[in-house]
């Protein structure tokens, strides 16, 4: 069933979380900011209350074989906590294996070591745009 309004995306990291936000019609994703991961519950509250977000896409980094590894388990644990704290928000898991690398390279495949600028919010925007284009019903 289609959802209306703004959608956010979170690229969860141990230290930082990249955040992206859709336009009010839920069509175009834009990078928003990078927030400390320790501030995540309060920031999600801000997204819901102040930005009108009712749906949040969370990147889950599966292995190249599509399996759930250590990082994905850590993110899924955080996601479970968020679901309990925000029962009225729809959370969607999204396979984000390549979004950070693509965001860092502008789509050119540059490795992590060559990256000096924080791109977590750009990765979140790429992930969110993929989700919006997929029709939001996945």
Image (cartoon, rainbow, N blue to C red):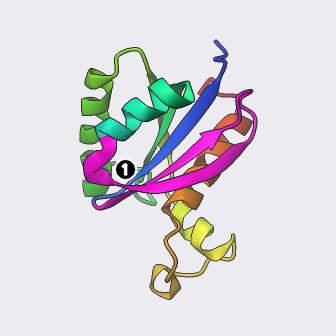
Q: Position of residue 34 (x, y in %)?
A: 46, 57
Residue 81 x/y as whole percent: 24, 31
Q: Secondary structure at mark 1?
A: loop
Question: How many marks are shown on the rendered structure?
Answer: 1
The residue sitting at 24% across, 39% down in the picture is 77
- Answer whether residue 115 is magenta in the image: no
For the point 54% across and 69% down, the residue is 101
Q: Nearer the viewer, residue 79 or 117?
A: 117
Determine if residue 42 is in view: yes
- Image position of 46 (left or right of 86): right
Picture quarter with the C terminus: top right
Asked where in the image residue 85 lies, by quadrant, the reply is top left
Front-lying residue, 123 or 137? 123
- Indicate yes or no whether the magenta region holds residue 31: yes
- Locate residue 38, reporting x and y percent: 25, 50
Nearest the viewer among 129 and 30 is 30
Q: Residue at x 34, y 57 (%)?
A: 13
Q: Is residue 48 left or right of residue 27?
A: left
- The percent coordinates of residue 104 (x first, y second) are 58, 72
Which residue bears the numbered disc 1? 67
Q: Is residue 137 above or below residue 88?
A: below
Image side of residue 102 versus residue 36, left or right = right
| Extent of the magenta region | 15-40
């Amino acid at each position: 069933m289609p959802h209306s309004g703004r959608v956010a995306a979170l690229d969860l990291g141990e230290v930082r979380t990249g955040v992206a936000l859709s336009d009010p019609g839920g069509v175009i994703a834009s990078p928003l900011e990078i927030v400390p991961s320790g501030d995540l519950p309060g920031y999600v509250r801000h997204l819901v209350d102040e930005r009108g977000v009712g749906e949040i896409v969370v990147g889950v980094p599966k292995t190249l074989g599509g399996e759930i590894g250590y990082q994905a388990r850590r993110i899924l644990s955080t996601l479970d906590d968020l679901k309990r704290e925000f029962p009225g928000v729809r959370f969607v898991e999204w396979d984000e294996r390549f979004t950070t690398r693509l965001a860092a390279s502008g789509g050119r495949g540059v490795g992590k070591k060559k990256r000096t600028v924080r791109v977590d919010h750009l990765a979140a925007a790429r992930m969110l745009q993929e989700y919006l284009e997929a029709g939001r019903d996945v």
